[in-house]
Amino acid sequence: MNFLAQHAYPAQGVTLCTYLIALAAVQKGLKVSFIDNLAKEGYLKHCDGLSATVLEISDGDKTYCFDRSRGSLTAYAAVSVAVNKWKAKEVLLKSGVSTPWGTVVEDKKVASSPGYFDSLGFKKVVVKPVSGTQGRGVVTGIKSQEQLERLLNEYSYEKFLIEEEVSGKEYRYYVADGRVVAVAGRDPANVIGNGKSTIRALIKEKNKERQRNPHLASRLIKLGIIARNYLAENGMSPEYVPPAGEKVYISPSANFSTGGDSLDATDLVSDSSKLVAIQAAEALGLPNTGVDIINVDDNGDEKSYVIEVNARAQIGSHSFPMVGAGQDNLVAEAIIDAYFPEKKGFCARGVFFDFQSIKDIISDGQVSRVTLPVIEQTFIKRKIEVLSDEVDLSKKAEAIKKKMIKERCYGDVSVYSNGVCHLSMLGSKESISAVKSFVSDAIKKGGDVSVKAMKAAIELKFEVRDFSKIEECQLPFKAKYIFSGVVQNVGFRKWLRSRAIDMNITGWVRNRSDGSVEAVLSSQEKANIIRLVDLCKEGPKGAVVNGIEELKTTERNLSGFRIRRLR
């Protein structure tokens, strides 16, 4: 579990978005307050349609509120359209965005009448409530009038949507700051056989893995009636022992809340499908949103159908996927950048806060607002190890903490059983210097400490991170290139990878089905990429490069340089 996952874990569930948005804002030097009672705070004017507990984020001039991932720049009118699947479909179609054909049914008797299914003209349809979230009430794979009637006899929604079911790969695209920041794929609840364990036992083991994931910890695979029926339809039971390597699906639904796996697909989907997601967000007037898209291969041509748009989509799947590296906290950072564009380029990613303590303070009802410290760009982060054979440092810890608070120096003091004391501090150079002097004086008053030990403890044994220099990141130059000509089966990819590594360029390269080669190149020095592209005009022996096309790319930064599979 990485640092982000460790700190986000107490926020598992619906509050995970709140934590990630707050963290991004804190790391960008904004003032963040958790507000539990809007009416008491007199802050309803900023919170059109938001719920009772929100984040207030301010740069001193502008103030916005967030209800999980939805900010106050998202108009309530736009949300009401997005929530109504039929209204959203009408807006998308009017804007030229592809979405499956559908119709609203307000009377079950109409859909239950003989011949209704055949009149739709589709092999399969999906039934879903007009309004709903987290996949509730969505039923896929309806193939006949008989199946439709059987479903409607038990269906709890009076008003619902019937639409054509398109077959393809479904993804959740997250749009923020005018671009697709991350894409998550979905795979229905499943287990992989080992030749020894039953499906029941494999689910138990996989749930242990899900419980370690902040996004999936509260979304475990369950062996309910739907799962049992699905297994039975496929000739299995919970006691079946799958052979080693066999993948067994537990549910037909890929929804995370029913045990589905999240996959990091940001680098796997096409740029054209990302454009469809951006167009859908713009059509509905949503500055940041999750767009569900099914990509269909139509005789070699890709068609992207928008299935749903979620104005308050959960962003945890992009940070903590079940499969893939994940996008860290880039989605939340992009959301904050859209609201506070002047903060682009600065992010103190080494700074975290204790969310559990915030939850405890808010939940006891004693306060309605908790405000976090504001991180300034000139702050530095230092770790100091204090050594003393004469002084019981555990007795000095509380005094050191009070001094840190007084000096606006944020962090923690840890005393270990071997007598060593660690100070982790974040603050101005002056505040850290004041704390260091206080620690030095406190130790000297308590007993003798050698000059050598003090020098090692106070002056040398610390790590420095100056956020005004290191974390004020110089964004690397990134671009995608298409090399055409005789570039396959001549060692072009290995040759390019070798040159890129030599020139400290990161990214990837792969063959394309049309005979060209595609590469994404990233470097802090644009001149390095220009030199490499010039070398590619000649390429390795046997290659003939007839054309080089440069394209923009929204891919996140990649480490190393990989050769990918054929596209």
Image: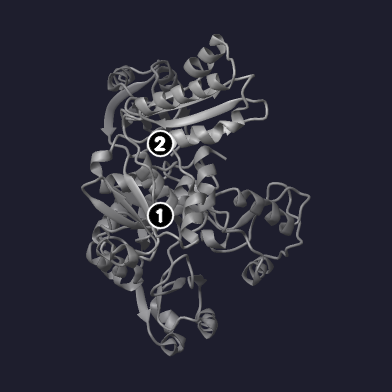
Vertical comparison of 98 with 420: above or below: below
Q: Quadrant of the N terminus?
A: top right
Horizontal and vertical percent position of residue 136 = 49, 70
In this view, the mark in front (1 or 2): 2
Helix or strand or loop: what does disc 1 sit on? Answer: strand
Instruction: Kindly tell me whether residue 346 is visible in this rendering.
Output: yes
* Residue 565: mark: none
Give whichever of discs 1 and 2 has the lower sequence position. 1
Q: Residue lying farthest right?
A: 196
Residue found at x 37% / y 39%: 27
Query: What residue is shown at x 53% (from left), y 61% (from top)?
Result: 257
The amino acid type, in three-letter code, at marker 1 is Asn
Instruction: Give the image quarter of residue 482.
Output: top left
Residue 300, image x and y in percent? 39, 49
Could you tell me which quadrant the C terminus lies in?
top left
Q: SS for tag 2? A: helix
Whether residue 350 is visible: no
The one of 82 and 460 positioned closer to us in this rendering: 460
Residue at left 61%, top 32%?
394
Q: Nearer the viewer, residue 101 or 512?
A: 101
Instruction: Name the residue at 29% across, 69% down.
Output: 81
- According to the picture, the residue beneath numbered tag 1 turns out to be 295
- Kindly indicate the quadrant of the structure image that contains residue 236: bottom right
The amino acid beneath tag 2 is Lys
Q: CA distance from mark 1 to mark 2?
A: 56 Å
Residue 66 appears at what percent x and percent y?
Answer: 34, 56
Specify whether 428 is left or right of 455: left
Badge 2 is on which residue? Answer: 406
Q: Nearer the viewer, residue 30 or 545?
A: 30
